[in-house]
Amino acid sequence: MTYFASARGSILRVIGRVALVLGFIGALFRKFVKRLRLPIPNRLRNFLQRRRKAGKLQEYYYLKYAISVLRVIAWIVLTIGFIGSLFWGITTGGFGGGLRIVLGIIGSFLAWLLLLAAREFVYLCIHLEEDTRSTTEGILDKSS
């Protein structure tokens, strides 16, 4: 048991050292490429700029589906919550039933609102990333 533990520890140390060396080599390579300051051909630069401006949701292909699913789930939660709270309140009856109807409708509305807010938050993150990228490109273009 101790042999395997010591072998595992030595393997992890070797892997850690290899990762450290590879990180150092990567940093040196990055510095070397940065110092070269190779010019980017105009065709490649134009292609890259078109690709960046192609559309925010094309870059994040699956987020488009996630946003649509969030909207559908939000509406499903609202309708099922509304109908379910009505059914539960009517079957219970009395003052407790009326209270369950009101609380169920308020709860389903808040869940619907939360899901739509999550959907808008995903949109916000996409737009924030795009605005940050365009601001950075503008600053780099002005400094060149």
Image (spheres, grey):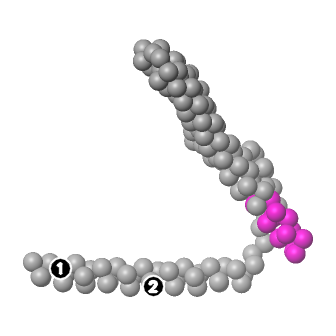
Task: Please name the residue shown 85% across and 69% down the image.
Answer: 139
Task: Work out which residue is located at the far front of the displayed protein and give it.
Answer: 95
Tags 2 and 1 touching, CB below 8 Å: no
Q: Amino acid at mark 2?
A: Val
Q: Which mark is residue 21?
A: 2
Q: Amino acid at mark 1?
A: Ala
Residue 36 vertical placement versus 125 (above, below): below
Q: Which mark is residue 79?
A: none
Across and down, in percent, residue 64 comes to 62, 38
Residue 140 vertical placement versus 28 (above, below): above
Across and down, in percent, residue 23 comes to 50, 80
Residue 22 showing in the rendered view: yes
**Closer to the camera, 102 or 143?**
102
User: Quadrant of residue 136 in the image?
Assistant: bottom right
> In the image, which residues are magenta?
133-144
**Element at badge 1?**
helix
**What residue sits right under mark 1 in the picture?**
5
Q: How many marks?
A: 2
Residue 56 vertical placement versus 113 (above, below): below
Q: Earlier in the sequence, mark 2 or mark 1?
A: 1
Task: Please name the residue shown 17% across and 79% down the image.
Answer: 5
Labels 2, 1: front one: 1
**Closer to the camera, 114 or 22?**
114
- Dot 1 alpha-carbon crowd within 10 angstroms: few under 14, some 14 to 19, many 20 or more: few
Task: Give the distance between the C-alpha atoms of the residues marked 2 and 1, in whole angstroms.
Answer: 24 Å
Across and down, in percent, residue 87 comes to 47, 16
